[in-house]
Structure formats: structure tokens, C-alpha cells
Amino acid sequence: MSFHDDHELHKRRFGRNVGLALVLLAFIGIVFGLTVVKVTQGGLEPSAFKGQG
Amino acid sequence: MTDASFDTQATPQEASFGDYFALLKPRVMSLVVFTAMVGLLAAPVSVHPMVAFASILFIAVGGGASGALNMWWDSDIDAVMKRTQSRPIPAGKVSRDEAFAIGITLSVFSCIMLALASNIFAGLLLAFTIFFYVVIYTMWLKRWTPQNIVIGGAAGAFPPMIGWAVATGGVSIESVLMFTLTFMWTPPHFWALCLFMKSDYKDAGVPMLHVTHGRRVTRNHILVYTLLLAVVAIGMAFTGVGGPIYLTTALILNGLFILGAISIWRRNEEVSEADGYKREKSFFGLSLLYLFLHFGAILAEATLAPYGLGGW
């Protein structure tokens, strides 16, 4: 008994899912990196927002 | 869910990830990335590499989003023109609704993310750029006036200004000049393409200059805009983003570009047809190199400045 080959359609859907997963992972990485930079540079400290209110 | 349910619901034309990516006009996006990066690096304020990277990425996504919205609106004429027939919508791989949803979502996403990553002014400038390209150019000017590409070219000229705004939070004479360089470059670049993509725009009913006013007028316009462009490009050498490297590059490239424009101006259709629009095609190729090298020279000046080599 052997499994049949994936239809070309399934391969395309798989590629789409993998692509989307990579994009989302990259987005998480970018937001994380930006957060680290903003916090370490002091841009998110309460004093930075004084006078804006 | 069974395999059978998959096959009954899907069409053989179902899009791959690459088809969705193609909606974002990757080649245009590469120009956006490069010019925005130069604008950002040439600015007198330094930006953290992570912020710079993320900002350029969001500018690129915004540029891509406007490309998707352009393909959504123009899918009817894209199907007629040979140059655009293989785009995802006319090729039947992505539906118009999908392109619209992707375009709108990424537009909002990119502007908000850019504002959060850098500053609100940069985010607003990106939003205005998308609005200008999609509404002013694509929906209004493109099918209405032969000056479409002259005014619409502004949309492609904003990225270096946005890059500059990411670093400085505002606008200055240097960023306006970088905008003007791309703005003045677009008409001769596009009109040269029109001369050898002969019937495409006519078939699609788009009132490009060569369709409404003829090829002689288009050749005249290419020469005039190339001369005006040279004034802007060489004049920029004497501003804060210029220097000896930029001046040398600008003098050589503008000399070659003017010679190319004169050559196109002196030719007529018989001569051009006889050699398969050889001069027009080489002028178009040179125009791509022209913009890349001008911004490359600005980048070189900015990169070498800390070592005392760039700038005046």
C-alpha cells in the first residue's frame, strides 16, 4: 500500500501557509526588536510623554 | 475534511504565496527600499539600525500595498496591455476582492507601524503617498490626462522624503531635492518606455502623451524634461547631501542622458522602427542606471562623511 502523491494544489497551499507563517514570525521578531530598542533608549519612559497630554 | 472536498472547492488557478507577493510589485518595491534607505542614511540625524531596518520595511510594505490597490483598480486595462497581462489578477490567480483586501489592510498596517517605529510625521507622509498613488494617480489622473505620469510620478518620488522624515521627523531642502530628482526623472523614463511599447496604452484607452499628442511631441517632451532634470540633479551636488563623488557622477550621467535625449529627439518613427527602437530602449536602460547611481552617490557621500571623505 502506498500513499498517493500530493496534488499540485496541496503543494501550493502548503507553500502559502509556510510563507504566511514565516511572515508572521518575522513580524513578531521585528516588534520584539523594536520594543527592546525603544525601552533601552528610554523612549517609552513616562517622562518622555510629559507635556504631551 | 477529505481530499475530495479540497478538490471541489478549489480551482487550478489557486494562488501561490508568490502570486500574492507579486501583487506588491516587487521591482517597484526595490526602488522604494533603495531610495528610502538613501534618504534615511543621508539625513543628519542618526537612527538606531533596528528602527532604520523596520522603518524601511514598513515603507516598502506601504509601497507594495499601493501597488496591490493599483492592480485592483486597473485590472481591466492590465488584461489588455501585453506588459501587464501576466499580473496576478488578469492571469486569474488572485481575485480583485483579494487584491483590494490585501491592499487596504497592508496600507493601514504599514502607516501605523511606521508611525510607531519612527514618528507620526513619517507615518502620515507614507499615508499621503499611498493616497496620492492610488486615488490621485491611479483613479483620477491616469485615465484622464496625458500629464498623468508627470503629476503621478510624485508618488514614486516620496520614499526618500519619508526616509529623511524617519530620521529627522520633518522636511528640509535636501529631502525636497531628492523628491524633485525622482519626480523630474519619471517622465523621460516612462515616455521612453511608451515609445517602444507602441500600442499597449492605446489599446487600453489610457491617454498617454504619445497617444493623445503623437510621438513627435513625446520626443520633444523627453528632451525638455531631461534638460530640466539635469539642472536639478547637478544643482543637488551643492547642497548638504552632495559632494565631489555626487558631482562627478551627476556630470557624467547627465551628459550621457542629455546625449540620449537629443538622439531620441532627432529621430523619427521610420528611423526608430528600422532598428527596433534601439536608442529608445538604451535610453530607458540608462534611465534605470541614472537614478540608481545618483542615489548611490548620495549614499556614498553620507557613508564616507564620518571619515572626512564625503561632502564638501
Image (cartoon, rainbow, N blue to C red):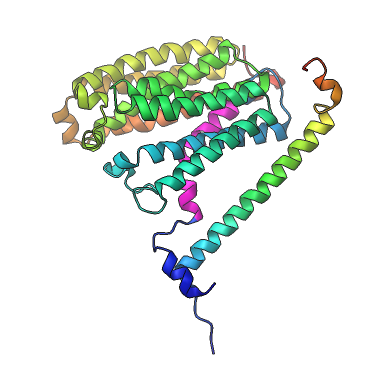
Main SS class of the magenta portion in the image = helix
- The percent coordinates of residue B102 (x first, y second) are 50, 43
- The percent coordinates of residue B254 (x first, y second) are 41, 19
Examine the rendering and report whether any part of residue B99 can be seen.
yes
- The percent coordinates of residue B290 (x first, y second) are 43, 26
Question: What residue occupies the far bottom of the structure in this picture?
Answer: A1
Residue displayed at 20% across by 36% down: B275
Residue displayed at 78% across by 31% down: A38
Quadrant holding the N terminus of chain B:
bottom right
Tell me, yes or no, whether the highlighted magenta stretch contains residue B25: yes
Which residue is nearer to you in this view: B168 or B248? B168
Location of residue B12 by image quarter: bottom left
Quadrant holding the C terminus of chain B:
top right
What is the tally of numbered marks visible in this picture? 0
Which residue is nearer to you in this view: A46 or B167? A46
Task: Report whether B212 appears left or right of B305.
Answer: left
Tell me, yes or no, whether the highlighted magenta stretch contains residue B19: yes
Magenta region: B17-39
Residue displayed at 57% across by 14% down: B174
Residue B228, placed above or below residue B279: above
Which residue is nearer to you in this view: B54 or A45? A45
Residue B299, placed above or below residue B172: below
Examine the rendering and report whether any part of residue B188 can be seen.
no
- The percent coordinates of residue B105 (x first, y second) are 55, 40
